[in-house]
């Protein structure tokens, strides 16, 4: 079952036009729809009969028999994914609604129970000899298509536990990490912040950090710090429990590092991630330190406070971008690259595939959920009309287009590792940015756009690698014992000054701002995928500018591949290699060049 691809950092009423809501009826009409009951019943029987037919018998199957088993497994995965997508999306719309939370939990409980008989599948598969599997794959073209799946299963072979322990872990998962995830989601969505006597949620309060009025930014930052501080004990408990649970499972499995599981899931080599991380950290002085010193000068400040990090520039207008204008901007940028891209994006606006408005209890941030390959993705936004919200729309639509194209691979092969999942989204942002830059009516507007893009790239690259370092430190420290809130605060602050630069002062209370980042809770070490995607897209876009002829077709072929190819195979047609440390320097140099341009504009 697939998970949403979350956006990097959430942004939080104005007249924005007619903001769309989700129509989830393409999954199921209602929670009591007969089709839902039918599918849940089918799933229970399909899992039971699958185990009856194949448990203890995989090694004796011929190629045709194994192909049939894979296809039956894929059908089960599709139905389970459809049910959980429906339950999960309803929940994200209003995480504070007890009925929606109960429905999601009940679906999760039943599907976990139904699918427990399937645990034998990967375990037994990995007890077969490699030569035997290779022989079967070589004997049947239909089976050979699933070789990438088999290769990923076999990578987990050294880390498998006994059949009994694997079944236990599967069964208890609903009261393990997923339960703590829900507690975190519900707590975050239910937080209340008081600004000028008005109570509002986290999205609206975070949005103050990008207001033109500096006093409003400071007010928002201090109120965030107050509320996070009041709740820091609960957030520390969530992180302590999840990191300890991960340490226990990693130890039993023999995972070499806390990051090993994420690297395996991303189908990326640890040395590639290390090369990325080292390249970004080495570039901090050339990127974030230099840019924020420049921004301080623009803002007329000797020292920057944390509430100035995402401040608009003084020459930037406070204009709000309505929904229709945002749609037109992104769609025209997509069409300018290739009309096929706009055609793929159009149904998201026309058919209820986007939920855009900020609402009480709605999950913060933004994401694209692929659901299942015989339906379509859904995009969630918290749209407030800021220019960055337009870029978020471009980003999430990129995910959506990618997921639509990859669906032709089928349920098992469509899912793209997180490192590649960011490709189309960041590329969609780049297309939108380049269009706006080309059409900028003045040098001042061009400067604002360029600065905004640099900030977005710093947030995507520098900030996410700092987040990754924080997580590495957190999980390493937790192995030595329980961490107090102050311990976690200190780890957070240890990466902030290093990544943001010497121009910043950090207000009292900023040390708790780790508390609201969902990635640390939902998907440990997820965050480096953003930096990977940004560097990859910078290199791709440079290849597009250097040799535009035929680029679009190669790009669409890459997206259509989904998870059926390794990153090295996908990048080869463009002459790119992520295993080369110099690859990351190329991507970072694009950001550096933009900062050069900004300094030149500054005279």
Image (cartoon, rainbow, N blue to C red):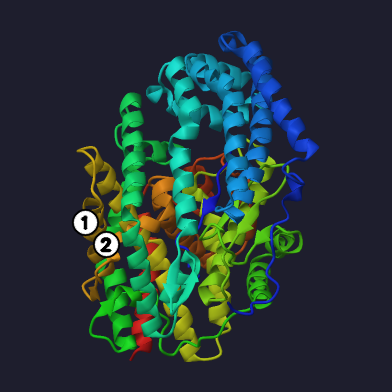
Query: Relative to residue 37, is residue 183 drawn left or right?
Result: left
Characterize the local packing of mark 2: few (<14), some (14-19) or many (20 or more) Cα atoms within 10 angstroms. Answer: many
Element at label 2: helix
| Mark 1: few/some/many CA within 10 Å (<14, 14-19, 20+) | some
**Is 235 above or below relative to 323?**
above
Q: Percent from the top left, x then y, of residue 506?
A: 24, 71
Q: Residue at x 50, y 33 (%)?
A: 174
Q: Position of residue 55 (x, y in %)?
A: 58, 12
Q: Quadrant of residue 398?
A: bottom right
Query: For residue 504, what is the image quadrant?
Result: bottom left
Left or right of 442: which side holds 489? left
Q: Which residue is mark 1?
A: 490
Q: Nearer the viewer, residue 506 or 525?
A: 506
Indicate the secondary structure of the residue bearing disc 1: helix
Give the residue number, with chain letter if any, for mark 2: 511
Toward the viewer: 118 or 58?
118
Using the image as rendered, state which of residue 22 and residue 304 is in the foreground. Answer: 22
Q: What's the CA distance linking mark 2 and mark 1?
A: 7 Å
Label 2 vs 1, first from the N-terminus: 1
Which residue is outermost to the front?
197
């Amino acid at each position: 079952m697939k998970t949403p691809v979350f956006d990097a950092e959430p942004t939080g009423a104005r007249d924005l036009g007619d903001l769309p809501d989700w129509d989830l009826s393409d999954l199921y009409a209602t929670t009591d729809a007969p089709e839902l009951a039918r599918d849940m019943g089918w799933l229970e029987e399909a899992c039971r009969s699958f185990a009856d037919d194949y448990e203890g018998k995989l090694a004796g199957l011929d190629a045709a028999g194994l192909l049939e088993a894979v296809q039956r497994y894929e059908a089960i995965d599709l139905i389970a994914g459809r049910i959980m997508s429906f339950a999960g999306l309803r929940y994200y719309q209003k995480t504070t609604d007890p009925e929606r939370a109960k429905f999601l939990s009940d679906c999760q409980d039943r599907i976990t129970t139904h699918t427990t008989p399937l645990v034998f599948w990967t375990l037994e598969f990995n007890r077969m000899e490699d030569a035997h599997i290779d022989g079967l794959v070589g004997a049947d073209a239909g089976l050979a298509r699933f070789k990438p799946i088999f290769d990923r299963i076999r990578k987990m072979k050294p880390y498998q536990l006994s059949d009994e322990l694997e079944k236990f872990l599967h069964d208890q998962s609903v009261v393990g990490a997923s339960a703590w995830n829900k507690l975190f989601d519900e707590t975050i969505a239910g937080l209340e912040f008081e600004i000028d006597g008005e109570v509002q949620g986290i999205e609206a309060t975070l949005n103050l950090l990008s207001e033109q009025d500096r006093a409003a930014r400071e007010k928002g930052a201090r109120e965030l710090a107050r509320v996070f501080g009041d709740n820091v004990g609960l957030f520390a408990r969530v992180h302590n429990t999840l990191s300890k649970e991960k340490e226990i499972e990693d130890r039993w499995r023999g995972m070499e590092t806390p990051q090993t599981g994420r690297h395996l899931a991303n189908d990326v080599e640890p040395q590639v991630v290390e090369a990325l991380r080292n390249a970004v950290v080495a570039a901090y002085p050339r990127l974030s330190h230099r840019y924020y010193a420049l921004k301080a000068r623009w803002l007329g400040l000797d020292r920057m406070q944390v509430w100035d990090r995402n401040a608009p520039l003084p020459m930037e207008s406070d204009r709000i971008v309505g929904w229709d204008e945002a749609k037109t901007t992104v769609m025209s940028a997509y069409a300018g690259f290739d009309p096929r891209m706009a055609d793929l994006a159009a149904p998201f606006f026309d058919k209820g595939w986007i939920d855009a408005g900020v609402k009480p209890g709605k999950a913060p941030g933004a994401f694209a959920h692929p659901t299942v390959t015989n339906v379509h993705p859904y995009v969630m936004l918290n749209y407030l009309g800021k220019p960055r919200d337009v870029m978020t729309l471009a980003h999430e639509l990129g995910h959506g287009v990618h997921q639509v194209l990859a669906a032709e691979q089928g349920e098992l092969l469509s899912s793209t590792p997180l490192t590649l999942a960011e490709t189309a989204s960041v590329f969609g942002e780049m297309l939108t940015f380049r269009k706006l830059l080309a059409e900028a009516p003045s040098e001042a507007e061009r400067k604002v756009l360029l600065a905004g893009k640099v900030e977005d790239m710093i947030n995507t690259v520098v900030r996410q690698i700092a987040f990754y370092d924080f997580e590495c430190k957190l999980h390493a420290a937790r192995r030595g014992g329980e961490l107090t809130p102050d311990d976690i605060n200190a780890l957070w602050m240890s990466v902030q000054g290093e990544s943001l630069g010497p121009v910043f002062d950090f207000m009292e209370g900023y040390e708790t701002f780790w508390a609201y980042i969902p990635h640390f809770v939902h998907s440990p070490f997820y965050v480096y995928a953003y930096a990977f995607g940004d560097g990859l897209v910078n290199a791709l876009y440079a290849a597009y500018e250097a040799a535009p002829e035929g680029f679009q077709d190669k790009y669409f072929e890459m997206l259509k591949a989904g998870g059926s190819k390794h990153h090295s195979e996908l990048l080869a047609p463009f002459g790119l290699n992520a295993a080369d440390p110099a690859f990351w320097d190329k991507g970072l140099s694009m950001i550096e060049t933009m900062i050069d341009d900004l300094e030149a504009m500054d005279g």
